[in-house]
Amino acid sequence: MKTIKGITPFKNKIWLSSPTMHGEELKYMQEAYETNWMSTVGANINEVERITCKTVGVDYAVGLSSGTAALHLAVRLAGERLYGQPKVGHGTLEGKKVFCSDMTFDATVNPVVYEGGEAVFIDSEYETWNMDPETLEKAFESYPDVKLIVLAHLYGTPAKIDKIREIADKYGALIIEDAAESLGATYKGKQTGSFGDYAIISFNGNKIITGSSGGAFLTNDPNDAEKVKKWSTQSREAAAWYQHEELGYNYRMSNVIAGVIRGQYEHLQEHIEQKRTIWDKYRGGLKDLPVSMNPIPDDCEANYWLSCMIIDKNAMAYQVRREKDVSYESEVGKTCPSEILEAIASINAEGRPIWKPMHMQPMYRSNIFIKKDKEDIGADIFDRGLCLPSDNKMTMEQVDTVIGVIRQCFE
Ligand SMILES: *Cc1c(COP(=O)(O)O)cnc(C)c1O
């Protein structure tokens, strides 16, 4: 690593994206405590579901224990709708291919496997870093029988959802929209999470608002909402005793956690504003370097969850990532994500590599991966890109300090 000169490390660590509490959270948690609704039932859950519907513009939201749980139930619901109810002990997607975002957190994809499906990965595009609609079209040409798409909006930038919807409709496929990272972002004026046949959001600790954990399933269909709520509470039938006709889960949201989320919702817009200011500051400060910020096309409004950058190809220093470690060389006038991440860490701040694409993961390496042409775009963005410290409590001076460190990496 190049030696970083003239910069004092931050006294308190600057995180990638940490929870930011405001006070109301405690009030609603305390209400749960004082009224003894210390359970998976209560006013906070009802309110979180109501506010979620209003924010995203959907008719029904079901509060769940995590975004992953919401994805699992969305996948199960889609599987049953497409292929019918499986025998007990079997998944709904056994032997079925599902088109999935490739460059994303593995929580997007794992639920397909929980249901016995086979994830087929669709490469990303440079314009949004999300699933490339042209590659999706190509995938359908090879596998026209596929009936399900799981689509993530990475880092708060919406995918080209219009085109993806058009293709899905042409082939009669359903879309599950993973809006875990994009709560509050809009595409052509419409909120992410309102486009999919089913959609999910997450309230995990590092998301734009958080309950410490939690998630929600979103739909416009009252029967879907009822079913997911029932499945999430162990599939109890309406009977005087515990009567079960189908498989259930313990996935319901806690009323205490819902209190935190309820308080956080009052600050969603403020968080987005803060994140946008940070992203703008980075963009301005890095303008004259051979890098670009993560793309935000004109037809959408991102939530700016994470500020990311990508190094121009001709400014990349030698870097080789092996399974679990990396080597790189410090070169004059060039750098690489590994060097920048080390330099950022050396001043007590946290950056992170881009999500390592699923087709490069040992557990998914033998799955089918579909690219537009020869180039592996996901692998390239992973190689040259990184996430910058994006905590909404960062001051502009602190962002400037990080920019100064990045600048020195290019010397
Ligand atoms: C965080 C995240 C999830 C999972 O949400 P949890 O609430 O952590 O289970 C799913 N998909 C993406 C893209 C995420 O970033």
Image (cartoon, helix red, strand yellow):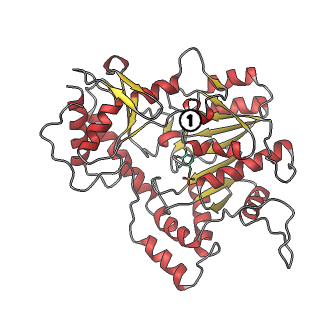
> Which picture quadrant has residue 138?
top right
Bin the neighbour count of mark 1 within 10 Å (Cα to Cα): few under 14, some 14-19, many 20 and up. many
Which quadrant holds the C terminus? Answer: top left
| Closest to the observer, 315 or 35 | 315
Percent x, y of residue 109 = 63, 41
Which residue is pictured at 33% across the width and 27% down the height? 336
- Is residue 126 visible to us here? no
Vertical arrangement, residue 233 with respect to residue 114, above or below: below
Residue placed farthest to the top in the image?
374
Looking at the image, the residue that sits furthest to the left is 6
Query: Residue 291's quadrant in the figure?
Result: top left
Q: Which residue is mark 1?
A: 159
User: In the image, residue 362 lies at what x, y percent?
Assistant: 57, 33
Kind of residue sitting beneath label 1: Ala
Q: Position of residue 94 (x, y in %)?
A: 80, 40
Determine the secondary structure under disc 1: loop
